Image (tube, helix red, strand yellow):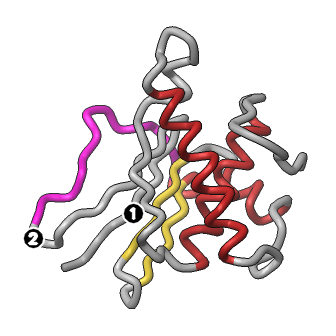
Amino acid sequence: MKKCVYIAAIILISIYSCKTSQTPYAPERKPAVSQNDTLRIANDELEYEVIIIEPGFNTWLAATAQPRNYYSQSYLETKNRIWIAEWNNRVQQPFRYNPNLYEMTIAYSPTINYGYEVNYLIYNYLVFFQNTFKQKLFGYVPLR
């Protein structure tokens, strides 16, 4: 059984698990982005995959984000749990928070070990998102 974790964003994040025998998730509308706007990390050993589609994120990740192993995995998991909980809260309140920013909930389970790379990318996407769109999900957000 292969599980997939996707972050698809043009201000859209979606993480979910799926069986390999199932048809992959296909959004109703496909964002118009170039190949350079797509970041894909696949780890067959962990059986998870992250796909981030966000204009400017790849450039920001390469130029601005802290290098890998700067943060511990437990730090990344803690921040991701807090920020994703707030993200999901905002998805449920479309009249209070911009529904164009918070379109879908994120299914991030604290009982699953996604591994360092997946947590690193999710964390950095959420830092990028908060700084780019002037949002504050919770607590300290590194300014970069």
| Pick the front one: 58 or 124 | 124
Percent x, y of residue 16 = 33, 56
Query: Dot 2: what SS?
Result: loop
Q: Residue at x 45, y 37 (%)?
A: 32
Q: Amino acid at mark 2?
A: Ser
Q: Residue at x 68, y 57 (%)?
A: 79
Q: CA distance from mark 1 to mark 2?
A: 15 Å
Magenta: main secondary structure:
loop
Measured along the vertical axis of the image, is residue 43 above or below residue 22? below
- Name the residue that disc number 1 marks: 5
- Residue extent of the magenta highlight: 22-34
- Name the residue that disc number 2 marks: 21
Query: Dot 1: what SS?
Result: loop
Image quadrant containing the N terminus: bottom left
Task: Tell me the tag on residue 20.
Answer: none
Image quadrant assignment for residue 78: bottom right
User: Left of 91 or right of it: where is 56?
Assistant: right
Q: Residue at x 81, y 62 (%)?
A: 65
Percent x, y of residue 141 = 82, 46
